[in-house]
Amino acid sequence: MRRTKDSWPLVSAAGCCDRIRPVAVTDPRSCAVHQPNLFPRLTTLAKIFTADVWVVLDDVQFNARDYQHRARLAPLGDPAAQRWLTVPVHRPRGRGSRIEELQLADPETSRRRVAQLVHQYYRRAPHWTSARAAVDEVLAALALTDRVADVAEVSTRALLAQLDWRGEVVRSSTLVTSDERSERLADLTEAVGAETYLCGRGGARYLDESPFAARGLTVRYPPQPDLAGLNGMRTLSALWAFAALGPDAVREQLSATVSV
């Protein structure tokens, strides 16, 4: 997978509003489609890191039991002892609200909760500075927008920037696609000019590859990073790995996954 400096993701305090420059492509492009998650899990980050394009799936129905507005934190010495970090949300259309429509119910309370809990868990970590830098991006976003999708996207992009990821970010709400699940994913892959769709372990349970084959597209199932095999790591926010191991170690592990 070859990328160029021109594809660097622009993450700032107002990262949710930045324009992403096009990726200069020399190899066939791959894309990952995933909902915006607050401080995503390592497996989610690995899938996006492997891709040339991250399609932020923000025009699907919000699921309160998922990770769009919350993340799991854990003590450095016990990744399995997890606690939810949740930002309260307002669903303007009730249960039918899409992720892109979600609003923060109490932005100031959310800012305090994020700052206090992350500091409580990771302030003594060997790489606290790296984790804090990503958190600071999110705190700034919480002060600038009441859109949950924006805040979650910023949290992911902040971590990806520390990994030197140089891909492109596109929101599914800006594209026209089919309503059928696998057809939609194939439509999104084609719409962003990718030839390969990267499917995670969860998506593999329902994916129908025939819409991809009909378009001449490839489906690939990238392996899980080794760290995800640790007790509790599959549900834990990647913040734990950034704080405990540092971005360089995380990048090395994810790069090894890409090369498989």
Image (spheres, grey):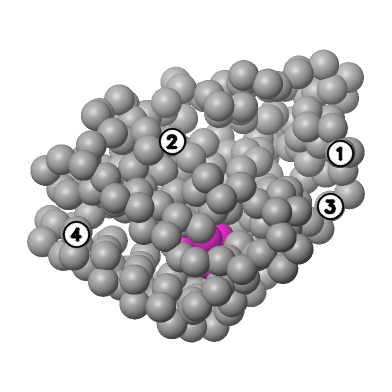
Which residue in the structure is indicated by mark 1?
179
Foreground residue among 75 and 88: 88
Q: Mark 1: give few (<14), some (14-19) or many (20+) Cα within 10 Å.
A: few
Tags 4 and 3 touching, CB below 8 Å: no
Which residue in the structure is indicated by mark 4?
122
Foreground residue among 43 and 236: 236
Which residue in the structure is indicated by mark 2?
43
Amino acid under disc 4:
Tyr
Which region is colored magenta? 150-155
Q: Is the magenta stretch mostly helix, strand or loop?
A: helix
Amino acid under disc 1:
Asp
User: In whole angstroms, how far apart are the C-alphas of marks 2 and 1?
Assistant: 26 Å
Q: Residue at x 61, y 62 (%)?
A: 149
Which residue in the structure is indicated by mark 3?
175
Residue 29 rendering spot, x and y as whole percentages:
68, 37
Residue 171 rendering spot, x and y as whole percentages:
71, 56
Q: In which quarter of the image is the C terminus?
A: top left
SS of the residue at dot 3? Answer: loop
